[in-house]
Image (spheres, rainbow, N blue to C red):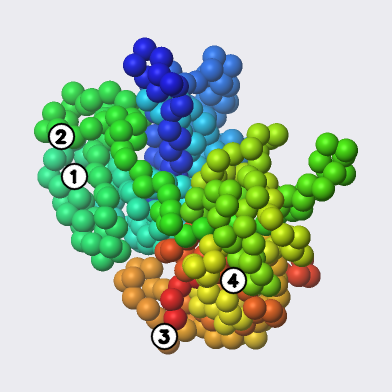
């Protein structure tokens, strides 16, 4: 359906911001929302009053996203702040993540559902360790689109030479990380140059503004459409006269297209059946795609529980107790070989033991460190685990949902790590 030539159903773009401390991530988002007229009057008044209390002479738009009191007192972001806004062209969900090294886990959290990563670089400082770290994490999380915003160009006299030098260094980095779709924009988040409006100070830049780019960039949404994956979250039994015999398996489609009549295999039992119906909010659907939350009923009465998964019979995922992962460790206590944890893979849970640590990533050089394999908080490492029962999974590159898991300390119930499954 179209209204005045424009689609009624605007596409949604999820993006995360990253960069070192004080690179201007929050200011960029504040400027984006301010210049695109997406800030309510009461929010604007709140920013003005907060700025006065902090003794800021100029309007500080970073205060829009620095929501925690500790952040506002320090003038930094220490948690993931989510913001929603929309333009006539698109809807957006922004995850503003912290820049400190000790908050790498927050960057992983914010980036885990993102389609696009926006990484800020201070034009005065150039490419730093955090720039490399955040670029690597974006690559690890299979984010296939990155925009590098070279910020604070006003503080380097709008120098094209400095922008070109940083762009060249970043180009070498993304080649090493094998990231296909990369963009570079010189900006001043503080003054709005090339954020929403084109900069009069950098007429040498002929590319798109930041807003124009995020409105028009083509995102590869469904990264693996052909593999049918449906993790079961709960069983629906209405027990009403109208639906007396109805048994539906509810969950969110993690991949592929499901249609009534499709033959499926239930994991882990390997029992086969056919889809009888696909239901959503009282409606019967002709098909469901990745991202849809639906209830699927089958022709046969099969014992299915939370944690099971429905897949295409000719495309069974890996089933094993031995799994190789790239892990980001979140906890202050170091990871130990032999440590026991609870893993959660979609709706499936199992115990596991850490069998080995193959190597730790050296973020500065992007090399594998086989000597110093002590994994501390915010470290990223390649590990092998053994689970208490066979589990079913894909590699993360094949399916981000069925190829990722979290690790939970059973004693404290803390989430201590996130893992992305890799090939052997």
Q: What element carries label 3?
A: loop
> What residue did someone put label 2 on?
205
> What residue did someone put label 1 on?
163
Identify which residue is drawn at 64% across, 72% down.
270
Q: What element carries label 1?
A: helix
Which comes sooner in the sequence, label 3 or label 2?
A: 2
Identify which residue is drawn at 36% across, 47% down.
220
> What residue did someone put label 4 on?
392
Q: What element carries label 2?
A: loop
387 or 235: nearer the viewer: 235
Using residue 201 as the reference point, say whether residue 338 is left or right of it: right
The reply to whether the C-beta atoms of the residues labelled 3 and 4 are less than 8 Å apart is: no
> What residue did someone put label 3 on?
370
Q: Where is residue 136 in the image (x, y as percent from the top left)?
A: 37, 62
Q: Position of residue 13 (x, y in %)?
A: 43, 38
410 or 305: nearer the viewer: 305
Which comes sooner in the sequence, label 3 or label 4?
A: 3
Identify which residue is drawn at 66% across, 69% down.
271
**Residue 239: quadrant of the picture:** top right
Residues at marks 1 and 2, CA–CA distance in whole angstroms: 10 Å
Q: Is residue 50 visible?
A: yes
From the image, state whether disc 1 or disc 2 is nearer to you: 2
Residues at marks 1 and 3, CA–CA distance in whole angstroms: 36 Å
Neighbor class of circle 3 (other Cα within 10 Å; few <14, some 14-19, many 20+) is: few
Which comes sooner in the sequence, label 4 or label 2?
A: 2
Decide: is 319 above or below 189. below
The reply to whether the C-beta atoms of the residues labelled 4 and 2 are less than 8 Å apart is: no
């Amino acid at each position: 359906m179209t209204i005045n030539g424009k689609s009624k159903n605007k596409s949604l773009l999820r993006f995360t911001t990253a960069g070192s401390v004080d690179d201007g991530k929050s200011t960029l988002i504040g400027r984006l929302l301010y210049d695109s007229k997406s800030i309510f009057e009461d929010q604007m008044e709140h920013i003005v009053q907060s700025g006065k209390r902090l003794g800021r002479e100029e309007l500080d738009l970073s205060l829009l996203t620095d929501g925690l009191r500790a952040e506002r007192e320090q003038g930094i972001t220490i948690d993931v702040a989510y913001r929603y806004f929309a333009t006539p062209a698109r809807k957006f969900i922004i995850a503003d993540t912290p820049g400190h090294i000790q908050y790498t886990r927050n960057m992983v959290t914010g980036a885990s559902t993102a389609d696009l990563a926006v990484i800020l670089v201070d034009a005065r400082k150039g490419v730093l360790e955090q720039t490399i770290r955040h670029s690597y994490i974006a690559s690890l999380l299979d984010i296939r689109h990155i925009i590098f915003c070279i910020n604070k160009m006003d503080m380097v006299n709008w120098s094209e030479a400095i922008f070109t030098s940083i762009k060249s260094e970043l180009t070498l980095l993304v080649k090493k990380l094998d990231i296909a779709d990369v963009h570079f924009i010189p900006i001043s988040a503080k003054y709005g140059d090339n954020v929403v409006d084109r900069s009069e100070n950098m007429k040498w830049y002929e590319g798109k503004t930041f807003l124009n780019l995020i409105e028009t960039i083509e995102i590869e949404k469904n990264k693996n459409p052909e593999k049918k994956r449906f993790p079961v979250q709960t069983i629906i039994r209405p027990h009403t006269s109208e639906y007396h015999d109805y048994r539906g398996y509810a969950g969110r489609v993690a991949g592929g297209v499901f249609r009534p009549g499709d033959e499926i295999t239930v994991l882990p039992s390997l029992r086969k059946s056919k889809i009888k119906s696909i239901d959503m909010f009282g409606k019967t659907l002709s098909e469901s795609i990745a991202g849809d939350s639906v209830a699927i009923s089958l022709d046969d009465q099969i014992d299915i529980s939370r944690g099971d998964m429905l897949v295409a019979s000719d495309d069974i995922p890996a089933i094993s107790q031995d799994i190789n992962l790239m892990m980001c460790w979140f906890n202050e206590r170091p990871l130990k070989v032999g440590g026991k944890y609870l893993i959660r893979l979609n709706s499936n849970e199992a115990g596991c033991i850490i069998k080995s640590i193959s190597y730790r990533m050296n973020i500065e050089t992007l090399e594998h460190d086989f000597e110093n394999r002590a994994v501390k908080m915010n470290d990223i490492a390649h590990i092998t685990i053994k689970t208490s029962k066979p589990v079913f999974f894909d590699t993360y590159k094949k399916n981000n949902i069925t190829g990722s898991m979290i690790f939970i300390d059973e004693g404290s119930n803390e989430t201590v790590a996130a893992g992305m499954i890799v090939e052997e």
